[in-house]
Amino acid sequence: MAIDKGILTPATVLQDVPVNISGYTPENFNSHCNGLIVASKALAFSLNIPAVDLLNKTGLSDFTNTMKRSGFQSIRKDRELGLSVILGGCGVRPVELAAMYSAFANGGEYMPLKYVTTDTLQRSSQMVSAAASFMITEMLTGLIRPDLPNNSESSMHVPKIAWKTGTSYGRRDAWSVGYNKSYTILVWVGNFSGEGVPELTGADMATPLLFELFNTIDYNSGSNWYSAPKSASIRWVCSQSGMPPGENCEDQIMDYFIPGISAYKNCSHLREVYVSPENKISYCMRCLPEVGYKKVLLPNLLPAISTFYMQNGIAFEKTPPHNPECARLFTENAPAITSPINSKSYLLEKNAAQQLKLTCNTEADISKVFWYINDRFLMSSKPGEPAFFVPDEGICKISCSDDKGRNSDISISVDFY
Ligand SMILES: [Zn+2]
Ligand SMILES: [Zn+2]
């Protein structure tokens, strides 16, 4: 559905960092985050955070309505479903999943299952477009898969199928579902009592059985494979984002997309920055000196990603602090001074050199803030790290600039007793 809404293609690079969506903080199965990850890999690895994030962007009610139309009984009954539905936060029967995957096997067209030949066929519905269905099949057919059973290459014939594994919370259910043009097979392994088993994973328990079943009924039937429908095309994209290449994107790969639907904004994973010769400070056009600067390409990371990298000790090329002498005032997202409090009076002991604490909240990609007292530079500090100063009596103007040159001022009054 995200593909049909233009949000996603197989090469789209997604964020896999801790998120908080209105209080909901999903975690990956192994509690590990990857930072950035390509969509097809996120799907094969069954990563929870990108899935929740994507559902949030795609729209929960559109998703659950489609699932209801596609035969999911417990989704139809449950009125209180949240974003966790994408992780299996609802009951799902194997036959429901099998019917859904056979829709992918049939160009996105959902058809209720028939159990006996005399079953009258119920109406079919288009679950996703033929193009989206084809791209999902491509993503689930990739040869390098993290969810191949252990040692499978040496011991097992891997059938030509699209497949997906799953392991439920508490290792109660291990399942693996696969399809080709002739068959859709779903394997569920677990205890009927619902008791979890530490060794139970879809990849190690259900997939070997799935492969064996395909090899038994349909050995080597790979010749008649899916081809792209007319509604899907191929384009070059930047490997760093999955978006059409910008002027600085050198590593380009081929990717499927839906013309007129898939997002087409050019990649800007790198941006040009003017810096001093020793990479100490960066300049904007306003404060760029006439000589003594160079132009460099630096990663253009979203605050959530750069914060994740910094918190996890992942090295990346940071943009140097912005020229502190720059007169340009950016108006949006300047540091918010949280201590002292604007327009308050502070009563301090005379001749005791009492200090006031300076703190602020900044954008996540800020590495340095600069404090000024009555327009005189006091000191620089890291965001989140308090600074201190001894004020004089009277009105005191406190300014905080970040390394992008954005500035906030507050004013307090100080009295001695
Ligand atoms: Zn790029
Ligand atoms: Zn500047």
Image (spheres, rainbow, N blue to C red):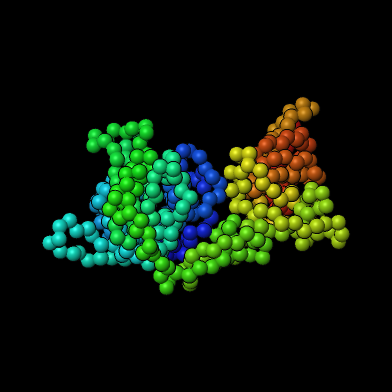
Q: Does residue 6 appear to the left or right of 113 in the view shown?
A: right
Image point (78%, 54%), residue name: 275
In the shown orientation, is residue 278 left or right of residue 124?
Answer: right
User: 288 left or right of 52?
Assistant: right
Q: Residue furthest left?
A: 118
Residue drawn 48% across the image and 50% down it: 144
Against 171, residue 85 (above or below) is below
Question: Residue 187, percent across and down?
Answer: 29, 46
Q: Can residue 79 be seen in the rendering of this structure?
A: no
Q: Nearer the viewer, residue 214 or 175?
A: 214
Q: Quadrant of the N terminus?
A: bottom left
Residue at 26% of width from left, 48% of height from top? 93
In depth, the one of 10 and 344 nearer the eye is 10
* Above or below: residue 158 compared with residue 248: above
Quadrant where the C terminus sits is top right
Identify the residue at image location x=39%, y=64%.
Answer: 226
Position of residue 329 measured from the top left corner of the image (x, y, whole percent): 72, 56
Q: Quadrant of residue 240?
A: bottom right
Percent coordinates x, y for residue 321 in the rendering: 74, 49
Q: Can residue 32 be seen here?
A: yes
